[in-house]
Image (tube, rainbow, N blue to C red):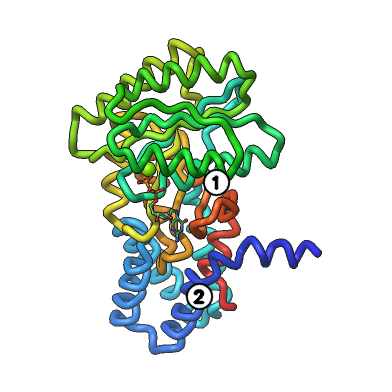
Amino acid sequence: MFKFIKRKITSIFSKFSIGKKLKNLFSRKIDDSLFEDLEKLFYESDLGVRLSVDLTEKIKAILKKDPDLKIDEILNILKNELKKEKVEFKDVEMKKPHVIMIVGVNGGGKTTSIAKLAHYYKKQNKKVLLIAADTFRAAAVDQLSNWAKKVDVDIIKSQIGADPSAVVFDGLKAALSRDIDIVLIDTAGRLHTKTDLMQELEKIKKVSSKVVENSPHETILIVDATTGQNAIDQARIFNSYTPITSIFLTKLDGSAKGGIVLSIQKQINASVKWIGTGEKMEDISKFSFDIFIDDLLSLE
Ligand SMILES: Nc1nc2c(ncn2[C@@H]2O[C@H](COP(=O)(O)OP(=O)(O)O)[C@@H](O)[C@H]2O)c(=O)[nH]1
Ligand SMILES: [Mg+2]
């Protein structure tokens, strides 16, 4: 029974496995070219330069001492090394209303992920409210409204071009009067290079904390897993403007590399909490770092 459940959860990660490639590599003669290829394999899996170099050096040193090491043992060493890269969850105490602000670049999956989170919390019998603070594009508000209908949760919106922080003000007032448990704030896909737009996030936060003390309680960064190292730069810039509590990694279903998880967590010292694996509201899972690493280095 347990095995079945674990298999179901892990299936999305198994495609990222580099176990077989590592096995092939270590069936070769152990020389400098093998270690070059090893480093390249790590790097191409989006593990980042530092980790790729460190892991290669580690394996090189270990094989020097014990050239007969079996592939299983090598993989276990790598697993232990990678598990040291874990970034612990930031403690988030659930409040009422619990306010979650969603940020990230356009097209990353903010609005879709909000629908997924709303669906997830609704299934837990929480009363959910969405706030459409992405007021720049008509399509953005419509998209969120459609999701609100589909998921069957309340939404507070305003006309296009309205001040996003004013919508947040109205939304949070409504949350207080309607006995809402979870508030999800959709924001515009701020170009992380545009300082003025980033300052708007700051304004939203200020207004939020005025209506609901210490809110937003969570700021979740949406990261498109298919964008590779680019996503790392985005994360760093977002985090410098508005501290990120956790990461929602989207489009893992369309991504070929898993290593981004490690580099992005380290970059902003926040952990991946959620993953998106499709376009439907059910395509959401909680992320487990340990299972992810086991799968990354699995031989299956
Ligand atoms: N395959 C897949 N597509 C996704 C996922 N999350 C979002 N999308 C798609 O990505 C596109 C942009 O999503 P959207 O929520 O509008 O992004 P936003 O601009 O950040 O709000 C849409 O076509 C979504 O259906 C996911 O986990 N997997
Ligand atoms: Mg959107």
Disc 2 residue type? Gly
Within 8 Å: ligand 1 and the Cβ of disc 1? yes
Q: Does 286 sit above or below residue 79? A: above
Q: Between 107 and 94, which is closer to the camera in this rendering?
A: 107
In the rendering, which numbered label is found on residue 25? Answer: none
Residue 282 in picture, x, y percent from top left:
60, 53
Residue in view at x 29 percent, y 56 percent: 229
Residue 184 in picture, x, y percent from top left:
50, 32
Question: In this rendering, would 170 be left or right of 239?
Answer: right
Residue 43 in picture, x, y percent from top left:
32, 66
Q: Between 39 and 44, which is closer to the camera in this rendering?
A: 44
Q: Residues within 10 Å of mark 1 (few under 14, many from 20)?
A: many
In the rendering, which numbered label is found on residue 116? Answer: 1
Q: Quadrant of the N terminus?
A: bottom right
Residue in view at x 32 percent, y 36 percent: 188
Q: Nearer the viewer, mark 2 or mark 1?
A: 1
Q: Between 48 and 277, which is closer to the camera in this rendering?
A: 277
Residue 233 in picture, x, y percent from top left:
26, 47
Marks 2 and 1, the one that precedes in the sequence: 2
The extreme top residue here reads 210
Q: Which residue is mark 2?
A: 19
The extreme right residue here reads 1
Q: Are marks 2 and 1 in contact (CB under 8 Å)?
A: no
Q: Residues within 10 Å of mark 2 (few under 14, many from 20)?
A: many
Q: Does 99 sit above or below residue 190? A: above
Q: CA distance from mark 2 to mark 1?
A: 32 Å
